[in-house]
Amino acid sequence: MTIIKEENTTISLLKDISLTALFVFIFTTLIITISGAPPFEAYENIIRGAFGSYSKFGQVIKVWIPLTLCSCGLLYTFKINLWNIGIEGQMIMGAVFGMAAFKYIPGTCPAALTILIAFIAGLTGGAIWALFAGFLKTFGGVNEIFAGLGMNFVAQSIILWLIFGPWKREGIASMSGTEQLSEPLWLSTFTKMRISPTAIVLTVASILITAFILKYTKVGLGLKAIGSNMQSAFMYKLKPTSYMLLAMIFAGGFAGLAGTMQVTGVYHRLIPTISSNYGYLALFVVMLANYNVWAAPLVALFFACLNVGSIQLPMVLQIDSSLSGVIQGALVLATLGVQSFKTMKKKRREYNNSNGRV
Amino acid sequence: MWIELKSIHKHYGNVRANNGVSFKVNEGSIHAVIGENGAGKSTLMKVLSGYTSRTSGEILVDGEPVYFKSPEDATKIGIGMLYQDPMDFPQLTVLENFMLGQIKGFRNSEKKFKEKLKKYTDELEFDLSPNAQLKTLTIGERQQLEIIRLLSLGAKVIILDEPTTGISVEQKDKLFAALKRLVKEGKSVILVSHKIEDVEILCDKITVLKQGCVTGEMEKPFDLEKALMMMFETESKTPVRSKIVPGKKHIEMKNVSVSGGRTGLHNCDVTVRRNEIIGLAGLEGSGQGVFLRCATGLLKPYSGSVSLNGKNMTGKNILSYQKENTVFLPTNRLEEGLIPGLTIKEHYSLRQKSRSLFVDGAKASSDSKENISKYNIKGDPRTLVESLSGGNQQRLLLSFIPDDAELLLLENPTRGLDIGSANWVWELLQDFSKDNNSTIIFTSPEIDEILMIADRVLVFFDGKIIKDVKTDDTNLDEIGSAIAGKV
């Protein structure tokens, strides 16, 4: 009799991570070398770009916030097996609705209240946008990926129309966006790092709420159940349609919150690229975190470091800042690769243990 | 070709499905492997056919040790297996299915294979039309095709796993005749079955498995009582039909037609009264499944009407049916009943009735423990349902029947259970029905089971109810020929 000894999970996890990191390292080093820049200097620049000063790390946190919020939202949709690629558009619409609140609430209203209303408006905007895709999926039979992508284009068009049309700056319409918000409507920030405590508190709260809902409530269990096997839902009196729409509302809500946060906390106006592809990037984050609510913020932090750290690459080394994208893409591919390699190895080990040969 | 198994072990984690099995299959004989469910029969056959790897042990073919990594390796050596559910391509024709796995190179003459197919069908007296689409065939016919395919691939030993489940009496006779002819030609057959009467008429030798070990071997003539003793720990009590008085109309279908399944359901007119226990007979996929799904609101009829307790339910969804205390347990446990990826405890959490937003973990734990011991489920609350054996999944599903259930629609409720457990389940359901005044409608591929339990039988053929009769007024033969479409 042979017993296959299970590897210690922590050790095997560390092994996986180092293997993935090694692959990504080799791959990106190769890419940088081919583009004619010194790779180690590039890495040093990325690290210094992300951690070199308080204000640089502040930038990292500014990216981390929307990335984490979108990731929180995606955890709900992934749980029920929906590919909410429309999260990008949901974030844009959140920003639009938030901006609308700032624009149309009279200045006599206290600033704090206006900001609160703007957050609620943004959340609602994102959720409504997600619901469109959700309805198309549940009642129209349109795959959520196509519905989401379509809605992204529509959202992008709406924001451009607003910036160049009804909401354009006095006199000139430009890519630089709408008129700035008056200063009381900005989220207040720490002086050194220029990041907003409100934004951080909201983000941390979002992580905790998401973890709680997914783990301890019937909603979380229902999402997981329907995501695992929709055909059996009737046995437990679960309505797949309602749960799908609910997941979309959550996802859109968090994305919309992120969008409004970009308006009041970062750009202080509406700009065409307000979503900065953070929605798409969050899809990567959640996959890389293996759909784990605690791992997602950490992966988001790492991605934020890469994004911010590579900003200065063009100036210093004349290589494009999209190097961060190369690293992120390689990471996701490497992770998937390592996982399937492990499954293959496990199968082979079972074979070798069989047939009487040990 | 003869085969010897030497001390075969197959372990899944801590579970020892096979624990040192040894026996020999002679050339030109029909060898039966019998045992109750979970005895390790199917696992052993999967090992022998290369479908799974063995943990340890040796397989000798004509005295030579063999190793296989896949079913193809086993087929090359000459061992072919017919699985319980045919593994074929329903969209393709008989000929195309026959050709698959045999074609070599780029160009293949259909004519050559057509002739080959005809040669085999003539020889074994099978009735297969080469151009028929496979999905229009019955399970029995698909079995016939699979046997021919294995022979054509060069199989000298054919393993059959429960081949007589879900096929008609005639098809069974045909199958047995064909197997006997093959054995005369020097081929060997291994038959896995829990039906002792099949084994008696067909086999030359019996090996009995219990809990992964060989507990007995027997040559002809068989002492069947002794064989049963070797299979089971204790003799179980056969359930007796309970005397009931039908009450008010419970569910009524008027001229109902539904699409779905292989055949759909056409012009169904049935009235079921409270307290009745009704068995639905018929070949698999003849409309029984569609009937049950329509009676529970999962499928909506395109014509006709359904009423429950006198209320018109036509077009209502399953939640409205559930409000009328209708319960449906499907036969595809992992596809339609349970949720793979979730534990037993999570299943009980999902079924909690309270309106609270939160999962009551403590209650779910106690529910799981209580039901695990009541239904004798081998597993603990943290076990993932997909890692339970088929019989245990069935018990878990049965434990979901709520206390206030009035109409129980059960699709093959004893599927995967051995005789002892099946009897126990029926006793439980009969008591439940008596105590709660509830009605039971169930399907079963076994006519015996239906005649034993039901007090009324509906026979389905090609999507229609072709016979509706009290059990007292009919017999096995009559139901048997009705299943084949002869009324």
Image: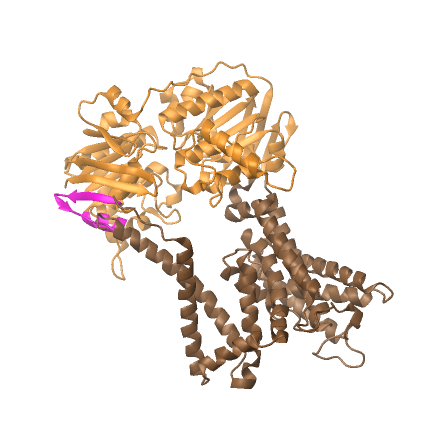
Quadrant location, the N terminus of chain A? top left
The image position of residue B13, as x and y in percent, is 34, 43
Q: In this view, does A69 lie to the left or right of B186?
A: right
Q: Quadrant of residue B199?
A: top left
Residue A215: x and y in percent read: 57, 47
Residue situated in front as seen by the camera: B443 or B37: B37
At horizontal 53% and vertical 32% (from top left) the residue drawn is: B367
* Chain B on-screen colour: orange
Query: Residue A342 location, x and y as percent?
Result: 37, 58
Q: Considering only vertical position in the picture, is A283 above or below B14?
A: below
Q: How is the image coloured?
A: by chain
Looking at the image, residue A305 sits to the left or right of residue B466; the answer is right
| Chain part drawn in magenta | B55-77
Q: Chain A is drawn in which colour?
A: brown
Give the x, y percent position of residue B82.
29, 41
Q: How many labels does the image show?
A: 0
Closer to us: A66 or A157: A66
Asked if the stretch drawn in magenta spans residue A330, the answer is: no
Residue B298 appears in view: no
Query: What is the residue that sits farthest to the left in this orientation?
Result: B63
Q: Which residue lies furthest to the right in this view?
A: A108
**Residue at point 26% right, 37% down?**
B19
Determine whether, in the image, residue B432 is placed left or right of residue B149.
right
Instruction: In the rendered view, tell whether residue B70 sits above or below residue B207.
Output: below
**Residue A313 figure quarter:** bottom right
